[in-house]
Structure formats: C-alpha cells, structure tokens
Amino acid sequence: MEAQRITISLHDESAGYEVTPSRVPIALLRAFASDVHDFLRGEGAAREAAGLEVAIIEGSLGILTAPISDPGLLADLRHLSQSESIDSLSRSRRLVVEGWQKAAKSARHVVYKISAPMLSKPVVISAASDFRADDADQWVRVERYVRGEIEDLGGSTRTNAHIRLPDGKLLKVYTDRAVLRDDKVNRLYKPAMVRIAADYNVATREYRNARLIEFVEHDTRVDEKELERLFQRGAKAWRDVPDAAEWVENLRGNRP
C-alpha cells in the first residue's frame, strides 16, 4: 500500500477557549503528543516512532505526519473508519482510542479526528461515537493497594500521578486536586504505597481508569519490642505442645 500522510487533530474548548497551535495548555500538548506517538507506533519499535517527522498544523490542534507505510497502522485506520469495535486493534492503539473516547464522553466539546487519503471518511471520536471493546466482561472494578515509585504529580487540566510499578510498567492514576494539595510529604522519586480504584482486566492483569484514593504510610522497619512481645505470647500459647510440627500435621489429618 502507498505510504500515507496521517492527520490527527484535537478540538478542545475545556480550558475556556478553543485550543490551537498558537495557544494550548502545556499539559494538554504533552498528553496529546504522547497519545499520538503511542497510536502511531502501535506495537512497533520505539526507534522507528522516534524517527517519524510530524508538523503541527492549524485546525484546532493538529499533527500531520510524514508519509507512513506501516501496514498494521493503515489496517487499523481502515478498521476504525468502518467499525466502532476496537477489539482487533493493537494494544497500544486500543488504549489510546479508549482514552480518547472516555475524554470525549466526559467533555462534550472534546473531539478527536483522524484522517488519511486512503480513508473515505475521517475517524471521529466524540460524545456521539461509541468506540469500545466487546470483551468488557473481562474488566472488573476493584480497589487495590499498589507499590511503586512516584515519577510525576500534578497537571493543570487533569490532575494525576505517574507510578513506576515493580515490573517496570508506568501506571497513571487520576485524583482530586485536594488529595495532592493536602499531602504534606514530598513523594517525588520515592517509593510509595497507594490505594487506588481501577478497572482490572482479569485476563491481562492490566489496570485502566485508575483513580488515586489515598497515599498509605508504609513503614518497613521492624519494631523489635513488638516482635519480642509476639514471640513471648507464642511461646506461652504453645508451651504445652511437645512437637509443634506433629500437632499441625494432626490438625491437617496427616496422621501416620
């Protein structure tokens, strides 16, 4: 297939004015550029995406790419122009489209548009569209305690925290401004325990739509006095048991 120039644009008036290349909140610009990068890259090599040239164009906030010949990307674009089911998309593009659809539903003046010469009509993600996966039954709402390193806090339009998990993945969690405003601890680049509410995929073990509920103080130091007190209580409780291992095995029914 012939290489295609792809235009991805965002129409957004949530800041009280129409966002354009000449006036855009920096947090919004960063988030949009990151989403566009992930959408164009898909599951491809990061080096290839990093070398892609783009231009910022007029028409709300728009990004025009150099010609792209990635067959996977072009196939996904053709699918999006014909169907609102996103099950067949690559994982990265699916997450981006899900995020854009949620943003458009939450703020009805937010519209994302993707166009290319090969498409008979642009892909429009708005409050009126319903791009979604059909495997919704795999997602359950949970509350979890999560440990990780805080890499970023704040945001001018959408307040969030970025948490680097032990497996290396980056988890973005949204929160009320008050949670960060009232927190007295400097948590940047430090390990932390947080309580979150999120959608959890029981098949892939991924989180989405995560919301920070609170920071949980977690002290890994051992209280020697408390530990000794527990040892003494245990010794007293087991003093009439000649063989603890045999006693446990008998409880389990593992008698010789």
Image: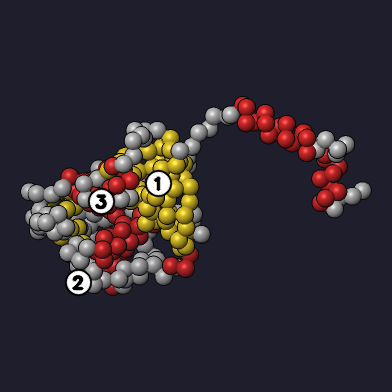
Task: Using the image as rendered, state which of residue 125 and residue 104 is in the foreground.
Answer: 104
Residue at x-position 42% and y-position 55%? 197
Q: Secondary structure at mark 2?
A: loop
Task: Using the image as rendered, state which of residue 25 and residue 242 is in the foreground.
Answer: 242
Residue 12 in picture, x, y percent from top left: 16, 58
Report the mark closest to the observer, 3 or 1. Answer: 1
Q: Is residue 245 above or below residue 142?
A: above
Q: Is residue 159 left or right of residue 9?
A: right
Q: Give the residue pinned by disc 3.
A: 158
Q: Is residue 212 left or right of residue 50?
A: right
Q: Is residue 164 left or right of residue 77?
A: right
Q: Secondary structure at mark 3?
A: loop
Residue at x-position 13% and y-position 49%? 24
Residue 95: tell me if it is visible: yes
Q: How many neighbours does mark 1 have within 10 angstroms: few (below 14), some (14-19), or many (20 or more)? A: some
Q: How many neighbours does mark 3 have within 10 angstroms: few (below 14), some (14-19), or many (20 or more)? A: some
Q: Give the residue pinned by disc 1.
A: 214
- Say whether disc 3 or disc 1 marks the residue closer to the N-terminus: 3
Residue 113: tell me if it is visible: no
- Say whether disc 2 or disc 1 marks the residue closer to the N-terminus: 2
- Please identify the quarter of the rendering in which residue 148 is found: top left
- Say whether disc 2 or disc 3 marks the residue closer to the N-terminus: 2
Q: Amino acid at mark 3?
A: Arg
Residue at x-position 26% and y-position 66%? 105
Q: CA distance from mark 2 to mark 3?
A: 34 Å
Residue 155 in picture, x, y percent from top left: 24, 45
Task: Using the image as rendered, state which of residue 130 and residue 159 is in the foreground.
Answer: 159
